[in-house]
Amino acid sequence: MFGRIVMAVLSLCLLLATPALAHFGMVIPESNLMARPGVINLDFRFWHPMEGQGMNMVKPKEAGVMAKGKKTDLLPALKEKKVEGFTTWQTQYRVKSPGDYIFYMTPQPYWEPSEDCFIIHYTKTVVDALEAEEGWDAPVGLPMEIVPLSKPFGVYAGNNFCGQVLYKGKPLAGGEVEVEFYNVGGKLKAPAGAYVTQLVKTDANGVFNWSIPWPGWWGFAALHTAEDYKIKHQGKDKDVELGGVIWIYAHPALSSEKGN
Amino acid sequence: MRLTISAVLFALILALAGAAQAHRISVYAYVEDGQIKGEGYMPGGGKVSNQQVQVLDAGGKVLAEAKTSPEGAFSLPLPQAKPPLTLVLSAGAGHRATYKLSAADLGVAATAAKAAPASAAPTAAKPVAQAVAAGQDLGPQIKKAVEQAVAPLRAQLAEMALRSNEVSLKDIVGGLGWIVGLLGLAAYMKARKMAGAPK
């Protein structure tokens, strides 16, 4: 009898614990605006951003930066760093001239037992150097990607963010885009589970709009199951969930009352 | 009639002000092959062509000037002057952009010589024409003096680049300092007013 109760409680815990957590690939620069040329620190990780819950990420398959149509490999410069006990990756990049720098990564497929599938989040973020404001709307060419239709930097909290979801370079209609706040250290508490991961669907042209409610880093993850391949797990073919993720920083809205 | 003219003027002023906002200009420069090279540009990819670029010394004296090419590019001779140098791009109607070239940007060596003669420093402030005329005799001396002067700054810059988190903390502390200072000033003014008021 006692054993049965323990089992019931345990399985209930497992059931309750798994579904709420949304995964996000993350590429976060120390700042998304650079007033001068110089060195910028970048952070690559796989995380539950709103819960502030970490995960281990093995070294990505690809990491790079695209600027003025040219790609530079950053993989050899990635250094492992433990954050809250989890494996993340860091690098530094020297920005020499004005332009928009799109930093991106392709992680290794991540096996997620609770969803019975592999996850690959192609992740990127845009850094503008010296107010060039040119190149932010160029697709990197990742298999799953959000191309911003509104400028992805110089954004105020309250602004609308508009993007187009591309799957293998073509607009994805009716696709789901999950949105989460990077809740550093899990300081903010969502009032209920429904608030943790926001969701918006794309229209016939693969376009979505979403208004950023408060300042900080926001991640947008367009999700789609790979149509043309599966990956084997313990001898069985499993689905691969592809994510096209972009991270946007929103500045606090200005207030004339406060005099800023 | 007069009303019409003022209305037109008002509209013109508004239009000009609006244009100035939408067409922000920027200037960027770097040192290569003993020259200052750079570009005048606008956000979103526009180039600032056929406009004046000046390089100023720390005292605001114009050392050299040039015009941007149709592609916004320019090059200037690298003046032998004490850093920092400031580039000023002027495109009329309130369009002005500046860019500072620090000692590090100018490629001054980090190895500061202790034995820089004190007399070298004032020569750096002499008019460019004179310094240029003096040519190679003054060059090494000026360079030494400049190196000595900027060595601590260079070290600080390098440290700042590596510890950007500390810089932001400094910014916060600095901001708090401002708040405290302004509150103090307000309190002082209030106290003065109260003391001065008739009893």
Image: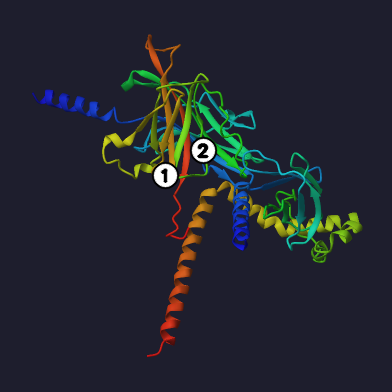
Position of B91 with respect to A147 (left or right) is: right
**Residue A225 position by quadrant:** top left
- The residue drawn where x is 73% and y is 56% is B83
Residue A95: give x, y in percent of width and height: 63, 40
Query: Which residue matches tag 1?
Result: A158
- The residue drawn where x is 81% and y is 42% is B33
- The residue drawn where x is 41% and y is 83% is B194
Q: Secondary structure at mark 1?
A: loop
Q: CA distance from mark 1 to mark 2?
A: 13 Å
Instruction: Give me the disc on residue B82.
Output: none
In the image, what residue type sits under mark 1?
Gly
Seen in the picture, residue A222 relative to A219 is either above or below; the reply is above
Would you call the spot at circle 1 few (<14 residues within 10 Å), some (14-19), or many (20 or more)? some
| Residue at mark 1: chain | A
Which of the two residues, B88 or B81, is positioned nearer the viewer here?
A: B88
Seen in the picture, residue A136 relative to B96 is either above or below; the reply is above
Would you call the spot at circle 2 few (<14 residues within 10 Å), some (14-19), or many (20 or more)? many
Position of A179 with respect to A130 (left or right) is: left
In the rendered image, which quarter contains the N terminus of chain A? top left
Q: Secondary structure at mark 2?
A: loop
Position of A259 with respect to B140 (left or right) is: left
Instruction: Give me the disc on residue A152.
Output: 2
Mark closest to the chain's N terminus, 1 or 2: 2
Q: Residue furthest left?
A: A1
Seen in the picture, residue A99 relative to A227 is either above or below; the reply is below
Foreground: disc 1 or disc 2:
1
In the image, what residue type sits under mark 2?
Pro
Residue A171: give x, y in percent of width and height: 48, 22
Residue A155: give x, y in percent of width and height: 49, 43
